[in-house]
Amino acid sequence: MLELNDVNVVFNEGTKLEKTALDHVSVHIKEGEFVTILGSNGAGKSTFFNVVTGSVPVTSGTITLDGKDITNEKVHVRSKHIGRLFQNPAQGTAAGLTVEENLALTGHAGTSLFSIAVKKKDVELFKEKLKDLHMGLEERLKTPIGLLSGGQRQAVALIMAVLDPPKLLLLDEHTAALDPKSAKTILEITDQLVRREKMTALMITHNMTDALKYGDRLLIFNDGKIIKDFSREEKEKLKPADLLAFYEV
Ligand SMILES: Nc1ncnc2c1ncn2[C@@H]1O[C@H](COP(=O)(O)OP(=O)(O)OP(=O)(O)O)[C@@H](O)[C@H]1O
C-alpha cells in the first residue's frame, strides 16, 4: 500500500552542511501491516515520515500510496489519507478548544465565523469513542483540552487521528513524553484501534521492548538506511538485548 522506491533526501546539498538523511531507501509496507521502527538519533526515522506526509520533499526517488504516485502531491492533499501523531500531544490538538471542539475539528462539525458547531449526534459518537479509552474522558467533553494531562490529551489526539480512519497512520514517538503508566495505556489503546480498524500503521519508538511487543514487522534505521527488516516470526525470537547490536554499527 505504501512504497518508497530508491528515495534519497539530502539537506543543504552542495554546502558544507550537506547531510544525507535518507540514503537509497526502498521499502514496501503492505495493507494492514503494523510496523514498528527503531534507530539511533539522527538515523532518518522522522525524515522517513516527513517524506511520506510531504513535509520534506524527496531529493530523488518515488513514493506511491495505494498504487498512486504521491511523490509531488501537496501535504494537505496527502493528509486526507495519512494521519500523524507526534511526541507532544500539543502538536495535534488545539489547547484553547474543548475536547468536543477538538474532536469536531476532524470534520464532524459545521463552522461559523465565531465558533465550531458541534452536532448533537456527533457528541454521542465522541462519547462512545472516548468511553473505549476507560479514562473517564466522556465526562469531560466541555473541558478545554489544554487542562487535561499529557496522557489524557494524547488519548484524545489518538481518537482524533482515527475518527475517520486514515489509510495510513504514522505514530512518531507518540508515547515518549508520557509517564510509564500512561505510555502503556496509550500503546495498548493504539494497538486495539489499529487492529480493530484494520489500519496500516507505522510507529517510531526508542523503546526496544515496545518495538518487539507491538506490530507485525520491525524496521531498523541507521545512517539514513533501513539496515534490518524483521518479519513477525523473526521478531518473536528476538530479545531487546539482541537489538542493541544494531546501534553499534
Ligand atoms: N531540516 C533539516 N535540515 C538539515 N538537516 C536535517 C533536517 N532534518 C533532519 N536533518 C538531519 O537529518 C538526519 C536525520 O534526521 P531525523 O530527524 O530524520 O532522525 P531521527 O532518526 O528521527 O532522529 P531522532 O531519533 O533523534 O528523532 C540528522 O542528521 C538530522 O540532523
Image (tube, rainbow, N blue to C red):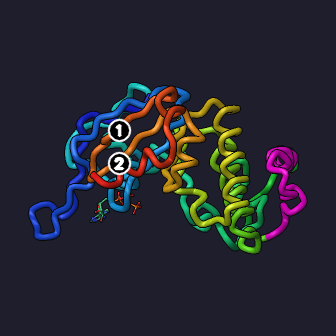
Image disc number at residue 246: 2
State how far apart marks 2 and 1 are (Cα): 8 Å
Location of mark 1 (residue):
228
Q: Is residue 229 magenta?
A: no
In the depicted structure, whether residue 227 falls above or below residue 2: below
Query: Residue 163, position in %: x, y?
Result: 69, 43
Query: Residue 173, position in %: x, y?
Result: 53, 56
In the depicted structure, whether residue 247 falls above or below residue 63: below
Q: Are marks 2 and 1 in contact (CB under 8 Å)?
A: yes
> Which of the pair 77/37 is nearer the observer?
37
At label 1, counting other C-alpha atoms closer than 10 Å, the crowd grade (few under 14, some 14-19, many 20 or more) is few
In this rendering, position of residue 101 left or right of residue 248: right
In front: label 2 or label 1: 2
The picture quadrant for ligand 1 comes to bottom left
Which residue reaches farthest right? 139
In this rendering, position of residue 114 left or right of residue 72: right
> Which of the pair 234/70 is nearer the observer?
234
**Amino acid type, callout 1:** Lys
Q: Is residue 82 visible?
A: no
Q: Which residues are magenta?
A: 121-143
Name which residue lies at 71% across and 73% down: 146
Name which residue lies at 80% across and 49% down: 133
Query: Residue 103, position in %: x, y?
Result: 72, 54
Name which residue lies at 27% across and 40% down: 25
